[in-house]
Image: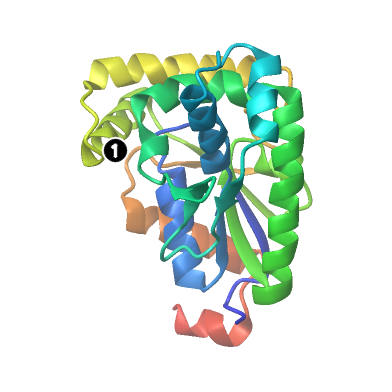
Amino acid sequence: MAGVLRGVIALDGPSGTGKTTAARGLATRLGSGYLDTGAMYRVIALAVLRAGADPADPAAVLAVAERTELTVGTDPAGVRVLLDGEDVAVAIRGGDVDHAVSPVSAVPEVRARLVDEQRRIIAEVLAAQGGIVVDGRDIGTVVAPDAPLKVFLTASPEARAARRSAEHGATGVESTVESVRAAVDRRDRLDSTRAASPLRAAEDAVALDTSDLDREQVITALTGLARERGLLDQVGAEALR
């Protein structure tokens, strides 16, 4: 069933900016599909760890990726994340996966496989619902470069570390803000310098600093940007005012 959104909203940015939370909330508000591309790389990272492979060995990572069955749902109200049929939505948020996901996602062949799948999912959801919110690190630059609205979320290092630490606590992972800050800095460095699809803002992306914004404020700001771009169905958009 079609929602309010018409087209693709691409949300990019580093971890701890509230990207995933905002994307799911925005998709829920607009009645659109939602795709968390980061979860897809995390599933592969988890599969690599469970296989006992070295995340820093591209050949080993690719071998695992080629035999892994990955399913990511697009309903923002209840996102399914499956690894070979097993629900791993909680498992992929662990500290071990946090550490492994950057080298795993840097393997060009893995990225190519997942980007193809992401584009397939986006096309499928657009045909069925008319709109989708997609979040990740290369959506506006690689996955959906023609998206009519691209937003690059940022936040201060302190705010990002605090958010990630809170996320860890919610999933039962013990961590300190200091250790999370170091992990966030490490991932930023790896993701920004990788050869394949490095983390960066698209030239035509709108920058949004979420340091001092809560979830609802970020969603409201994103809804406003979508309205300004003419991406909201006129009748449905009136109901959101």
Quadrant containing the N terminus in the rendered view: bottom right
154 to 31, vertically: above or below: above
Where residue 33 appears, as percent x and y from the top left, is 57, 65
Q: Residue furthest bottom?
A: 235
Return the residue at label 1. 167
In front: 79, or 14? 79
Quadrant containing the C terminus in the rendered view: bottom left
Please give the name of the residue rendered at 64% of the width and 22% of the height, measured from the top-left corner: 61
Q: Is residue 194 visible?
A: no
What's the amino acid at mark 1? Glu
**Lateral position of residue 218 relative to residue 100, left or right:** left
Q: Is residue 95 visible?
A: yes
In front: 179, or 11? 179
Dividing the picture into quarters, in which one does residue 62 lie?
top right
Please give the name of the residue rendered at 31% of the width and 21% of the height, measured from the top-left corner: 180
In front: 188, or 35? 35
Where residue 117 appears, as percent x and y from the top left, is 72, 48
Secondary structure under tag 1 reads helix
Count of numbered labels shown in the rendering: 1
65 to 88, vertically: above or below: above
Where residue 8 appears, as percent x and y from the top left, is 67, 60
Please give the name of the residue rendered at 45% of the width and 78% of the height, measured from the top-left corner: 240
**Lateral position of residue 144 relative to residue 41, left or right:** right
70 to 174, vertically: above or below: below
Please give the name of the residue rendered at 66% of the width and 35% of the height, measured from the top-left corner: 67
Q: How is the image coloured?
A: rainbow
Neighbour class for label 1 at 10 Å: few (<14), some, many (≥20)?
Answer: some
Dividing the picture into quarters, in which one does residue 54 lie?
top right
Where residue 157 appears, as percent x and y from the top left, is 37, 24
**Lateral position of residue 176 relative to residue 20, left or right:** left
